[in-house]
Image (cartoon, rainbow, N blue to C red):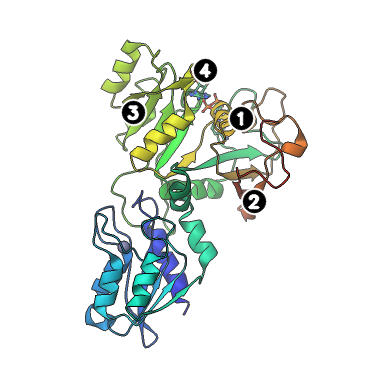
Amino acid sequence: MDFMARALELADRALGRVSPNPAVGAVLVRDGLIVGEGFTQPPGQAHAEIVALTAAGPRARGAEMYVTLEPCCHVGRTPPCTEAIIAAGVSAVHIAVPDPYPQVNGQGINALQRAGIAVTVGAHRGEAERLNAAFFHFVRTGRPLVTAKWAMSADGKVATRLRDSRWVTSPAARRAVHRERDASDAIIVGIGTVLADDPALTVRLEEGDAQRAPRPCPPLRVVLDSQARMPPTARMLQDGEGPVLVYVTAHAPADRVRALAEAGAEVIPTRSVEGRPDPGAVLADLARRGAIRVLLEAGPTLMGAFLDHQLIDRVMAFIAPRLVGGASALSPVGGEGIAHMRAALPLVDVSVCQIGPDVLMEGRLSWEPAAGGSSPEE
Ligand SMILES: NC(=O)c1ccc[n+]([C@@H]2O[C@H](COP(=O)([O-])OP(=O)(O)OC[C@H]3O[C@@H](n4cnc5c(N)ncnc54)[C@H](OP(=O)(O)O)[C@@H]3O)[C@@H](O)[C@H]2O)c1
Ligand SMILES: [Zn+2]
């Protein structure tokens, strides 16, 4: 059995439940058999290693641990995992990837080795980095990882000339979106999408979807709405399915702000750029609330603003084998955009898969300047 693959499966169960902490899985193996396993519990509660050690009890002595991220060696909200691993008498620790967090980064490995534990690093490293991409990004930049998701026709339209968009893709593709929402800490749209579609932005999983742990709270539903135009009757405010944050500017009329607050929204006045909430300021506020993995499901106007601000880190483009046409029908990303095709922003680590009749193209945007490359403003 591939025990690190099992540990990764466990880690996935914690995604969207433990931010701003990483989602980690751990497996303890003795004589080829799993004697304990676990994944990260919500912030302030046990790390994956502790859950696995507790499950194994005395069987942890002499066992080998497979863990998807370097064990912590500092006192955070919980005591260091390295000490618990050493005290339990674990003989070897296999780590998929070092923890980039400055207070750990290599020091967890050192602490284990100093105690005479054999340590290996790197099994399934790429998958472990992908699983915790948001955590790695957050540690590096201080910002949440933003995934822009859209569903378009083969001719690149996200809505018809009448602004109709239900539905572009098949139920199978939409199911994949709900899995992604379930891994996210927040979902963002612009007021244009709320007025056109009145979306619920809830997580609706189906039987047969791989189940994650119960969530302490649903993903934050976030609307950027300069003038507080969101109707208090919007579905999101009526369904009681969890928090709704509306970011407005200082110029939003007070009576509309009050009506939204009375309808249950948390209305947040935000620094503006060109009269609209600054996407960077919104992300900073979301990070302060512990959100590190954000799904941007906006229409072209807000997508374009995020791209122009270089705030899209990952793309999930669903492409349906249908044509819509229409010069005034909408394409996924507006804003100012890139002037010359040679300066178009490349996606890296691209994967393509078919979901029912539709195609999903995923990739990362790399904002680090390419060698000899050109700036995105070009
Ligand atoms: N197929 C898909 O994947 C998909 C997904 C989403 C939407 N859609 C379709 O897209 C259409 C709506 O497009 P849209 O572009 O109006 O939606 P949007 O991008 O979600 O909302 C745009 C509005 O957001 C507000 N906003 C707040 N802060 C902003 C900022 N910093 N930069 C830019 N805008 C900001 C602006 O209104 P204020 O100036 O009043 O604040 C703006 O008009 C609908 O037809 C919908 O069905 C399709
Ligand atoms: Zn720990």
**Residue type at the position of mark 2:** Val
- Specify whether tag 4 is near ligand 1 (CB below 8 Å): yes
Q: Which label sits on residue 237?
A: 3
Say whether residue 167 is left or right of residue 89.
Answer: right
Q: Nearer the viewer, residue 134 or 259?
A: 134
Q: Earlier in the sequence, mark 2 or mark 3?
A: 3
Tell me if residue 22 can be seen.
yes
What residue would you read off at disc 1? 159
- For residue 75, which quarter of the picture? bottom left
Q: CA distance from mark 3 to mark 4?
A: 28 Å
**Residue type at the position of mark 3:** Leu
What residue would you read off at disc 2? 348
Q: Residue at 28% x, 76% y: name it.
A: 86
Q: CA distance from mark 4 to mark 1?
A: 26 Å
Q: Are marks 3 and 4 in contact (CB under 8 Å)?
A: no
SS class, disc 4: loop
Q: Are marks 4 and 1 in contact (CB under 8 Å)?
A: no
What residue would you read off at disc 4? 274
Q: CA distance from mark 4 to mark 2?
A: 31 Å
- Specify whether tag 1 is near ligand 1 (CB below 8 Å): yes
Q: Residues within 10 Å of mark 4 (few under 14, many from 20)?
A: few
Tell me if residue 56 can be seen.
no
Q: CA distance from mark 3 to mark 1?
A: 24 Å
Q: Between tags 4 and 1, which lies in front?
A: 4
**Residue type at the position of mark 1:** Ala
Q: Nearer the viewer, residue 63 or 15?
A: 63
Q: Between tags 2 and 3, which lies in front?
A: 2
